[in-house]
Image: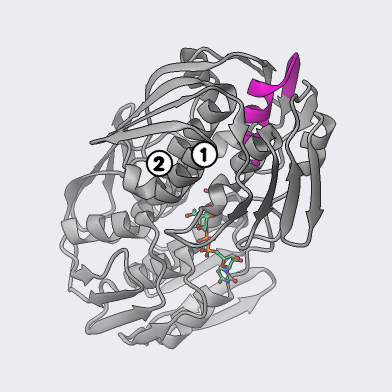
Amino acid sequence: MAKYIIRGGKTLNGAIKVDGSKNATLPILAASILCNDEVTLTNVPRFRDVFNMLKILNALNVETVFIDEHTLKINAKNAKFQAIKSDLSRHIRSSIFMLGSILSRFKEASIAYPGGCDIGTRPINLHIKGLRELGVDILEKHGQIKCNAEKLHAGTVVLDFPSVGTTENLILASVLTEGTTTIINAAKEPEIEDLINFLNSVGANISGGGTSVIKIDGVSELGGATYKIMPDRIIAGTFLIATAITGGRVELHDVNSEHLSSLISKLRQNSCHIVCLDDIIYISSQGRLKANSQIETQVYPGFPTDLQSQMLVLACVSNGNSVITENLFEMRFKTVPELTKMGAKIVVKGKSAIVEGVNKLYGSDVYATDLRGGVGLVLAGLKAEGYTTVHDIEHIERGYFELEKTLTILGADIKKVE
Ligand code: EPZ
């Protein structure tokens, strides 16, 4: 199993371009199977989850080819239905919103229960409930989800919770369904807006992206387009937090600072200096930070759960005490034992981690168990005294491409060892 070996204590300095968004790419890939003409996606990230999703598309006889490092051509005209085998769907959570797409295209679907990060039970009851309210017959048996959409119709669905994946699935299930479908209490994440912008660019008629009420006027067919994937706000946030922790001056290029308002506000409270200018964010930090007393993860535009693990590390080395509350996923404090090995002082009580900031972390052998927790351990290693080895980094490579190379460009001492 590959690992990172990090010698801590270096500050981060320099400029990098942020990759395209994993969580925008995945639903847009699912949507591409509905297009009659060729789709060209630019700014596509080369993360493991993206390649796993392409395996699912290829299994449906969809042609996909990278014509350069980040430009992907997709042609779904010869797509044909088949059940998505568990060896594929259990790899990534995003296979679940293949359901909406496949139902729109083939009127039937069969997928194994999806996998995903080890951050919680990841139920799909809201997906199932919403699809049934739009007329889909769904049978859940022996870990398989079998659907029939002959009676799929437009309608109004009120979500019990603004679930990102459920919102995406319902949009994909109704984009080619005659009539107007309305989703109330829809998720407002920027990745939903990117999916809607992509669909409208190939001929859909969807409004309300970024709000809690989304209206989909079904159309008879979708064409093709060239579309640029939005920047990955979680990767951008990860590098902002890394710089805050290590100290230094970093410029992030090709980012949308509006997507990071809640994080930027917290980092300014930590005494970081941050300037946002067009698609660049400048951050400088002395490395010893004032603690944020309280951080609560919320749905967008609140503080993102996908940056919680990274901010937990920042809290560990800040001046003062912090309380970090995780409201979205029930198992997103799994790095606590690893950080404790490094000298962190954290007590987990229910949904909250109570952190007493310490002057120093010490290098150690630590083990990644999920994507964002794993990258949090890398940030801890960048700060810690001595050497840190982060094991099981395939979790991290699901959502970060050549992380060690990017950090090395910024001055970190980090090596990847197979
Ligand atoms: C998406 O997951 C992201 N993944 C997650 O990013 C992100 O953390 C999450 O949204 C929240 O922003 C992708 O886009 C591929 P949800 P998703 O449905 O769609 C509960 C990463 O690190 N829920 O909004 O699965 C669920 O348990 C990943 O890139 C139900 O109860 O998130 C959770 O508590 C991790 N029933 C809450 O809603 C359902 O049917 C949020 O889940 C569905 C969800």
Mark 2 / mark 1, whichever is N-terminal: 2
Nearer-the-camera pick, 161 or 169: 161
> Can you tell which mark lies on residue 2?
none
The span shown in magenta is 372-389
Q: Is residue 3 visible?
A: no
Numbered mark located on residue 399 in the image: 1
Q: Is residue 127 above or below residue 33?
A: below
Crowd band around label 1 with a 10 angstrom C-alpha radius: few (<14), some (14–19), many (20+): many
- Label 1, secondary structure: give it: loop
Asked if residue 382 is among those painted magenta in the image, a careful observer would answer yes
Which three-letter amino acid code belongs to the residue tagged 2?
Answer: Asp
Residue 334 relative to residue 165: left or right: right
Residue 115, placed above or below residue 345: below
At 55% across and 45% down in the image, what residue appears?
307
**Quadrant showing the N terminus:** top right
Above or below, 364 relative to 319: above
Determine if the magenta segment contains residue 80: no
Q: Residue 232's mark?
A: 2
Q: Amino acid at mark 1?
A: Gly
